[in-house]
Amino acid sequence: MTSLIKLLLGLVIMANAACSTSQIIRNSEYANSEASYRSGDVPQAVQRFPKKEEGGFVTSIEKSWLLFWLGENDNTDLMKQVSTLDSRRYTSISREAQYFFYNESEDGYIPAEHEIIVMHMLNAMLFMRQEKWTEARVEARRATFFLQNYFREDQNHFDDPALRLWLAGIWASLGEWNEAQVDLRKAYELTKNKSLLPLLEGSKPPTEFTVVFTGGGPTVQWFDGEAIPTFTNNTSAPTYKISFETMPWYRRHLLRNTEIRDVIMKSNYMAQYYGLNTSVGAEKTVGYTAANTLRASGLLLGTAIVAGAVLIVAQAAQGGATDGMGEFLGYAIGGGVAVGSAIWKEGDKVSANTAKSADRRMKEGLENLKTYRYVRFMPSWISVTDKYELQTPQRIVTYLKSPNSKTKVQFVQAF
């Protein structure tokens, strides 16, 4: 009987697991990789990177970013994403709802504005590392296009000073200081940071220019009952005079998704929640039924001591399993009440264990629903300076400079 109970419970659990949404990378699955990256251990971050969503938009950018700081220059995955977006650049909200809540397919992911721009800028940096300067310029132009043009007529135009600093560094690397100044000027218009003004004077490029990426992006916090998370920047601001936080990227990401998250995601969240409750309830039902069966068996055995014991032995003998049955028969005849009591207690035990198991699975299931897809590992702050001074021993430096550039440009990832 115990084996039957275990089998029934196992079938319920496996059925629920088979119906679970397990293809999307959960927040908890990023934890080890993100912790390694924030500590400056990029190789370990790559090794611990989640294995799901291979070739998807989000993971393609994340892995390309991590591998860039390890000296890699392969942009095959990024070019695939660029081609895909070129063929279907804009997708309706209904498509996003289908992606996130039903298909859970990376093919349906709708990137935020900053994620598209980052994709093109990162692609430009990888092309420069390959010394493909023309291709790098094309990607820089694409990033510029998205910063200067509307994504949707019914949305506020997106622009961001941190992205402008990043793009200015790319233009400087390509030897186009005039284009870099366009982005630096826009950053000034957005922030009124007077430290930018010296970089806007004249047309002579600086001999050195450094773009510093600090931190590894925001942390995600969930509050009970909320369908969307809260982003928090726990990275201290660098002391460079020209530094801009990237938190506006994520605030806008949340803002853009608020309408569908409040309406669709909550309903989907609750649908999954109720689905989980149903499966957990089924598990409890099976457990309670099995427990009550044990209790009933205990009463029967306690009432019909001899008949019950003989019946058990007879059935066991027919099945060829008679070991220990004689001992059990003697025990039953000598203490029918004890038998009934023992089996009743076993029923209580099964009931309690099943309830604990179901409650634990409910808690774990709700935790798995806490996920919000966005590109991680991006910097928390972006800074520029024409005279780089080491501010942290934990950093990675790479130089990108076209033959036409008169500026020594370095990109620094600081942790």
Image (tube, rainbow, N blue to C red):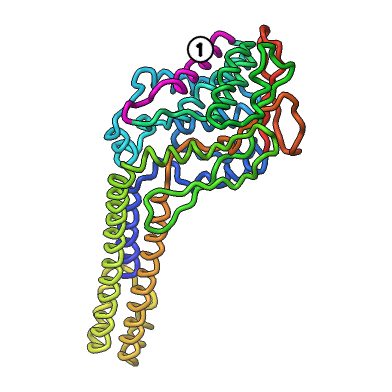
> Foreground: 227 or 368?
227
Q: Quadrant of the N terminus?
A: bottom left
Q: Amino acid at mark 1?
A: Val
Q: Position of residue 205 (x, y in %)?
A: 69, 14
Instruction: Check disc 1 and report the residue beneath it.
Output: 138
* Residue at 35 percent of width and 45 percent of height: 21
Query: Is 249 covered by the magenta stretch?
Result: no
> Foreground: 362 or 320?
362
Part of the protein shown in magenta: 133-154
* Residue at 55 percent of width and 39 percent of height: 49
> Does residue 317 appear in this view?
no
Report whether 75 appears left or right of 97. Answer: right
In this rendering, the answer to whether 303 lies above or below 246 is below
Q: Position of residue 227 (x, y in %)?
A: 37, 50
* Residue at 37 percent of width and 74 percent of height: 352
Q: Position of residue 378 (x, y in %)?
A: 56, 35
Query: Is 136 covered by the magenta stretch?
Result: yes
In this rendering, the answer to whether 155 lies above or below 229 is above
* Residue at 42 percent of width and 46 percent of height: 371
Classed neighbour count for the residue bearing mark 1: other residues with Cα under 10 Å, few (<14), some (14–19), many (≥20): some
Indicate the quadrant where residue 300 lies. bottom left
Indicate the quadrant where residue 4 lies. bottom left
Report whether 123 appears left or right of 257. Answer: right
